[in-house]
Amino acid sequence: MKRKTYQGLTFRPFIEKTAIAERVEALGRSIASDFEGKCPLFLCVLNGAAPFAVDLFRAADIDAEISFIRLKSYEGMSTTGKVKQIMGLTEQIEGRHVIVVEDIIDTGRTMSHLLDDLRALGPASLSVATLLFKPDALQVKVEPQYVGFEIPTKFIIGYGLDIDGLARNLPDIYVLDEEGAPEA
């Protein structure tokens, strides 16, 4: 894996695609075990979670459905502190087992807001699967049930995560590698 440069910032390799694939398979097996016979709805938070959600959905070898919503709380490398719904939920989730699939949880604000909205719709259960979790960055209590990797509070890109829309297509995850660069 080579370093990547976007918008004048250099990123170094952080988590290789093979490690990602192994972890996603393990999470899928765990979800399949926990939800056997329940036909859960995987609810992918676009855009960043799309690669993870699709891979996780395939790794969970059970009857399940997948749907998508789109929220926005980031601009550039930092959070705006506000959650904006771009594309909303179209399925009825009352009485359903719902697994929210997110790419990363850092401050917890976006996930907390989403979970509050979903709870009001009466699901049978509500779980969170996140590829990446930054526990040191949490500002709101959020406890994901399925975590790919706990990472430090650094800005990362790749495997769905972006910098202003770029780098989502990288199969590996990269971390910002520049002295004095802002953390997010």
Image: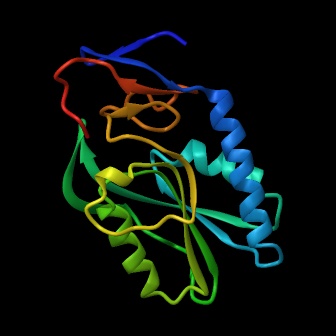
Q: Is residue 38 left or right of residue 80?
A: right
Q: Is residue 46 left or right of residue 24?
A: left
**Quarter placement of the C terminus:** top left
The part of the image, by quadrant, that contains residue 124 is bottom right
Residue at horizontal 58 percent and vertical 27 percent from the top: 171
* Residue 108, placed above or below residue 23: below
User: Image check: 76 left or right of 160?
Assistant: left
Q: Is residue 154 above or below residue 6?
A: below
Identified at 39% across, 49% down, the residue is 134
Foreground pick, 151 / 95: 151
Could you tell me residue 136's position as x and y percent?
32, 51
The number of callouts visible is 0
At a point 45% along the width and 79% down the height, the residue shown is 118
Display colour scheme:
rainbow
Image location (x, y in percent) of residue 64:
74, 67
Nearer to us in this view, 150 or 91: 150
Q: Position of residue 127 (x, y in %)?
A: 56, 71
Q: Quadrant of residue 83?
A: bottom left
Image position of 1 with respect to 15: above or below: above
* Frontmost residue, 137 versus 170: 137
Counting from the top left corner in percent of width and height, residue 66 is at 65, 62
Q: Quadrant of the N terminus?
A: top right
Residue at 75%, 73% in the rendered image? 35
